[in-house]
Image: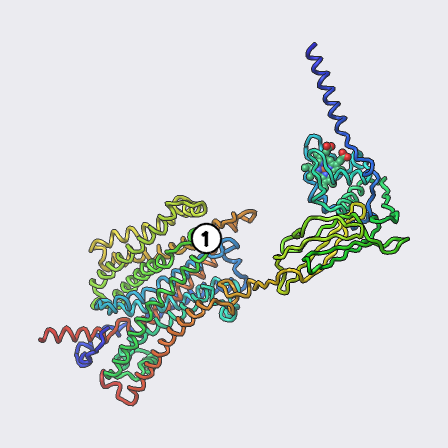
Amino acid sequence: MIKRYFTLLIIVLISMRLSAQVWVAPAENETKKSPFAFDDASRKAGAEIYMTNCKSCHGEPGKNNAVLLVPPPPDMSSVKVQANSDGAIQYKIAVGRGLMPSFKNTIPSTDVWKVISFLRSFNDKYVQEVSKNDGGGASVPNVKIKLNWLKESGQIQISLTAPSKEKGIQPVSAAEVKIFAKRYFGNLPVDEPRNTDALGKAVFNFPKDLPGDSIGSVQLLAVLSNDAFGDVKVDTTMSIGVPTYRAPLNEQRAMWNVVSKTPIWLLLAYTIAVLGAWGFIIYVFLQIRAISKEGSGKDTESAA
Amino acid sequence: MASEVNTDFLHNKKLDSIAADILRPVGITQGFIVWMGFLGISLMACIYAYYIQWDKGLIVTGLRDYISWGMYIANFVFFVATSLVGMLISSVLGLIGFKWVKPIARIAEIIAVAFAAIAGLVIVSDMGRPERLPYVFMYGRIQSPIIWDVTVVTTYLVISTLLYFLPMIPDLAISKGRIGHTPKWLQKTYQILSVNWNHTPKQYKILLKAVRIMLILIIPTAFAIHTVTSWLFAVTLRPGWDSSIFGPYFLTGAFVAGSAAVVIMMYFVRTNYKLDKYLTEHHFDMMGKLLVLVSIVYLYFNINEYLVPGYKMKTAEAIHLNDLFVGEWAFMFWSVQLLGLVIPILLLLFKFFRKPFPMFVISIVVLIAAWFKRLIIVVPTQDHPFLPIQHVPKAWMVYQPTVVESAITIGTLLLVVIIITVLVKFFPVIPIWEMAEEQNEIDSKSKE
């Protein structure tokens, strides 16, 4: 009797877990659509991103070679995945759940759309619906980012504008913008991310001690992360850093450098040693000549 | 070499007999023709081997990416090492004033010249694209020990040649009129090379000064040549090479190899040319003592070189040392250390073993061991790079010298023997005038 009771309990628990497994995206995400039409280029780019970030768990789509986890990472070509709307997949990738990591901070939203573009290539019945521009405010594409250097306060001011069908060029407000300074190995965030104000402007504090190149130029990258329309990036160079000149490593004299960059001490030591030794050798050759001169004309046989 | 020369010896009758003794083997004899014919034919085979390498590249050797220094480089180190004895005997011992080195000095210089001259060729044998040799001079960097090595080997060769030639000038003049039994061109050569020497005091003064300068200059040069050769290894970070005593370790090892080579040549000259009056048992006895001394010093450096890292057994070093002590290289390692160092030291402590024939045999063993010792220094280190060897064919992991490679190496040794033979057969191998001068001193002392 007790045994049966337990069996029942286990069945109930399992079915509860199964029901818990259904993963539904919030309604407002369900309807989100890609800002661009999927094409071969986006599928190819998406495949690459998928292979580096997702394959380790989900395996290759259609091959059912996912890693055995609980719950199992579904095969991307399965009905389970493909039944999702584009917006739902985008949400799930961005947010994650349990063992499925959140990629919000690792993969930019445009790239996520590219991955979806790749995933959809395993679904013959899929017909893409591209996001339609409704012409209102921030959702207008072709957002322009302008950077201004506010010399007195040492700040960077950013202004966002976008063309609108009815009202011409309009400021983009309440959009999150990040600024980075480009360094050798990656991008250094400048200040915190900021939202633009009603005039489409935001101000960033710029550090006073950031090294620039020899004339103080710093390459800046302003990024507007926009879920619906992808990222808008702009690259500008401003002479606002501390001018720094670092001689390239191959300019200094060093043991490992080319012969014209021999360390002085070595050059001296080598030259002195070679000249010294060969000076004596040449001197001795001259002595042989002196011996010969000394004996010329005299009877060489006399002694022997 | 004395600073003054008493030219009375020129009028001593004994000069004639000394000159006759020493000049008797000079010239082209039947034995010489047969011997050179044998050397020449053997050399042809080796030159053919080199032709194959020239044509196909280093792929015909056992050298691959990981073990890229094999027999050739070991052979190079051996050559440079053996040639150093010229400096030890004529310069260090001569300048200190040991009289017994007089008849041996020229033999030591012949060895120095022959080995140093061929050492350069040995390096070329290790080049896959030998026609690019000029690039060393065109694009070489002064920062590279390879350039220092090229510089110092050339300098050493020139100084050694001068040290062979300069003290021979009076001999050439003495011999000029006494070598009627030799071909005309040789007599002509004597005429030219004796540079109008007619034994004037001024000439002796100039000569002695020139020789003295060279004797002093060769000491730093010889130190440099072998220290730099050791640096070719020691300036790398690899276990077995990354050692701060590599310079003196190489230098002292060089004296062991060189002394053995001198003894071997002394024995040949003494027995073949019946010069036992000049190369006496006393000379062998002294060389035996010298060999013990340099061997003990070298043993001391060996203990340092192996015991200190062996005590610590750092990871990479431990792999290397295990290979030498108990692993793949153990047989060669212990054979070389025992036969080439420990046993000779023990034997040569006894007077019996310092007699010519036992000395000759011991020296041959020491010299062969010296060659293999260089192989042990060069090759095993490359068996274990810091990044383990993976996913390569078996042939790349183990160094297996090929026939072509061995033939080329033998060829370089033949060249050395040829040079030695030519110098010995065409020129007086023992300084006539120094022997006569010494004899004159003895005579005049006994008269008093």
Q: Residue B172: percent from the left, percent from the top? A: 29, 79
Mark 1 nearby-residue class (10 Å; few <14, some 14–19, many ≥20): some
Q: Residue furthest bottom?
A: A297
Under circle 1, the secondary element is: loop
Q: Residue A262: percent from the left, percent from the top? A: 49, 67
Residue of label 1: B238
* Number of numbered discs on residues: 1
Q: Tell me which corner region of the image, top left, top right, bottom left or bottom right, holds residue A70.
A: top right
Q: Quadrant of the C terminus of chain A?
A: bottom left
Q: Nearer the viewer, residue B220 or A71?
A: A71
Q: Residue B176: percent from the left, percent from the top? A: 28, 81
Q: Nearer the viewer, residue A33 or B53?
A: A33
Q: Nearer the viewer, residue A216 or B118?
A: A216
Q: Chain of mark 1?
A: B
Classify residue A295 as left or right of residue A220: left
Q: Residue furthest top?
A: A1
Q: Quadrant of the N terminus of chain A?
A: top right
Q: Residue at x 49, y 50 (%)?
A: B385
Q: Tell me which corner region of the image, top left, top right, bottom left or bottom right, holds residue A107.
A: top right
Q: Nearer the viewer, residue B147 or A263?
A: A263
Q: Residue A82: percent from the left, percent from the top? A: 80, 37
Q: Residue furthest front?
A: A152
Q: Tell me which corner region of the image, top left, top right, bottom left or bottom right, holds residue A88.
A: top right
Classify residue A37 as left or right of residue B73: right
The three-letter amino acid code for the residue at tag 1 is Arg
